[in-house]
Amino acid sequence: DTPPLLCGALREYQKTGMEWLAKLYKRNLNGILADEAGLGKTVQVVAFFAHLACNEGNWGPILVVSQDLNVLKWEAELKCWCPAWKILLYLGNPGELFKKRQVWTDPSNFNVCIASCKQFLKDYEAFMNVQWRYLVLDERQNGDNLAEQHWNEILNLQRSGAFINYKFPFCFC
């Protein structure tokens, strides 16, 4: 069922995607949500966030690491589909980012933090100090350009929930 926190109706395949993510979460498994462009993968993930809150009591903090150009898209989708969520956009000059990191001391100040991959890697040590309840790594068209060190940083991030690679275009050979 669609979580009551979610504003809007999901298509059947989006419900299926949300339910699949919920099954992964229950089993503490990682997953890759991969689909054709335009089918609403972001909405499926936002619906999953609503499921976590309504059905699992998990209100975050959740970290979304995305391409620079998708950070504001994530914010717009969250505000549209889940307006009750408190969103922390990790954007700004060094002084603004310092103030935003102060908000992290109390996770009830926000539900979802959205950061660019570039900013995440730059401020990795600060991100490590937060016990994230879930991590979403949004698509990276140049994912193969991430250094092994960067993968280790992403995979070693403190989190109690499973890790999602969200439409990550690379091949397991």
Image (spheres, rainbow, N blue to C red):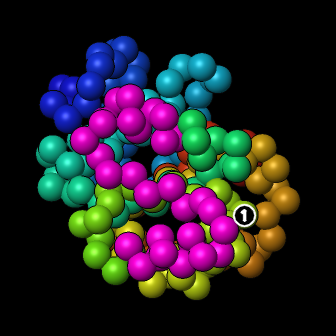
Q: Is residue 152 visible?
A: yes
- Residue in view at x 32 percent, y 25 percent: 15
Q: Is residue 97 magenta?
A: yes
- Residue in view at x 60 percent, y 76 percent: 95
Quarter occupied by residue 37:
top right
Magenta stretch bounds: 74-103
- Residue in view at x 17 percent, y 52 percent: 56
Residue 147 left/right relative to 37: right
Residue 26 left/right relative to 73: left
Question: Would you name the residue on which mark 1 appears?
Answer: 118
**66 or 56: nearer the viewer:** 66
x and y, in percent, of residue 153 in the image? 63, 77
Q: Amino acid at mark 1?
A: Lys
x and y, in percent, of residue 91 in the image? 60, 59
Task: Determine the residue located farthest toward the right in the rendered image.
Answer: 145
**43 or 105: nearer the viewer:** 105
**21 or 85: nearer the viewer:** 85
Q: Is residue 172 magenta?
A: no
Within-10-Å neighbours for mark 1: few <14, some 14–19, many 20+: few
Residue 121 left/right relative to 154: right
Quarter occupied by residue 8:
top left
Compared to 102, does 11 lie above or below? above
Give the main secondary structure, helix, strand or loop, of the magenta stretch.
Answer: helix
Residue 135 left/right relative to 107: right
Which image quarter holds the N terminus?
Answer: top left
x and y, in percent, of residue 55 in the image? 14, 45
Quarter occupied by residue 166:
top right
Compared to 33, does 95 lie above or below? below
Task: Determine the residue located farthest toward the front in the rendered image.
Answer: 95
Compared to 5, does 32 lie above or below? below
Q: Is residue 22 visible?
A: no
x and y, in percent, of residue 160 in the image? 34, 70
